[in-house]
Amino acid sequence: MLPELLERAITEFNARRYASAEAAAREGASLAATAGGRDALFWSGLHETCWGFALLMDHKLGPAEAKMASAIEKLRNFGYVYNELEVTSVLAGLRQGVEEIRHVRQKRKTQFDVTLLPNLKLAARADNNR
C-alpha cells in the first residue's frame, strides 16, 4: 500500500495538485505511524513537504515556510535515496522554496517565482537485463 501511496503523492505533487499530494502523503504517514521507526519519520517529512507547498499555493507564506522547514529537519538524515525517492532533490526543492518565501516575506521580491516549484523523483532503477 505504501509504494502506491508514494507514487500517487509524487504524481499529484508533480502535477501541482498539492492538496491531493498532501492527502496521499497524510494517508501514508498514518499507515507508517503504526509501524513506527524511520518510515514514520520519512512519511511525516513527505507529508509536511506536500502540505507546505499546498499552503504556499493558498498564499499562506508563514505556515508554508514553517511546514517546509519542519520537513527539511525530518528528511535531512535520510541520505540520497529512501524508499526509492530521491530525498536530496526533495531537500533542494524545500530549501529553495523556503529561501524564496523569505525573499517575498522580506519584500525583496513581490511574489513567489512559480518556475522554482520542484518535482519529486523516484531514483533510477538498475537495468538487470544487460
Image (cartoon, rainbow, N blue to C red):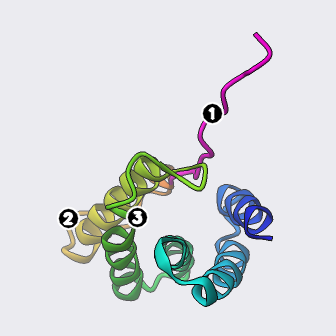
Q: Which mark is residue 116?
A: none
Q: Secondary structure at mark 2?
A: loop
Badge 3: residue crowd in 10 Å (few <14, some 14–19, many ≥20)? many
Q: Amino acid at mark 3?
A: Phe
Answer left or right for 107 relative to 26. left
- Indicate the quadrant where residue 108 lies: bottom left
Span highlighted in magenta in the image: 118-130
Q: Are marks 1 and 3 in contact (CB under 8 Å)?
A: no
**Viewer-nearest of labels 1 and 3?**
1
Residue at horizontal 74 percent and vertical 58 percent from the top: 7
Please provide percent x and percent y for residue 84: 60, 49
Membership of 94 in magenta stretch: no
Please provide percent x and percent y for residue 48: 49, 78
Please provide percent x and percent y for residue 121: 60, 46
Of mark 1 and mark 3, the one earlier in the sequence is 3
Please provide percent x and percent y for residue 101: 32, 70
Reply above or below: 81 against 72: above
Q: CA distance from mark 1 to mark 3?
A: 30 Å
Q: Provide the residue designation for mark 2.
A: 108
Q: Amino acid at mark 1?
A: Ala
**Viewer-nearest of labels 2 and 1?**
1
Quadrant for the N terminus in the image: bottom right
Front residue (pair 48, 52): 48
Answer left or right for 66 relative to 121. left
Q: CA distance from mark 2 to mark 1?
A: 38 Å
Q: Provide the residue designation for mark 3.
A: 112
Answer left or right for 107 relative to 65. left
Q: Provide the residue designation for mark 1.
A: 124
Of mark 2 and mark 1, the one earlier in the sequence is 2
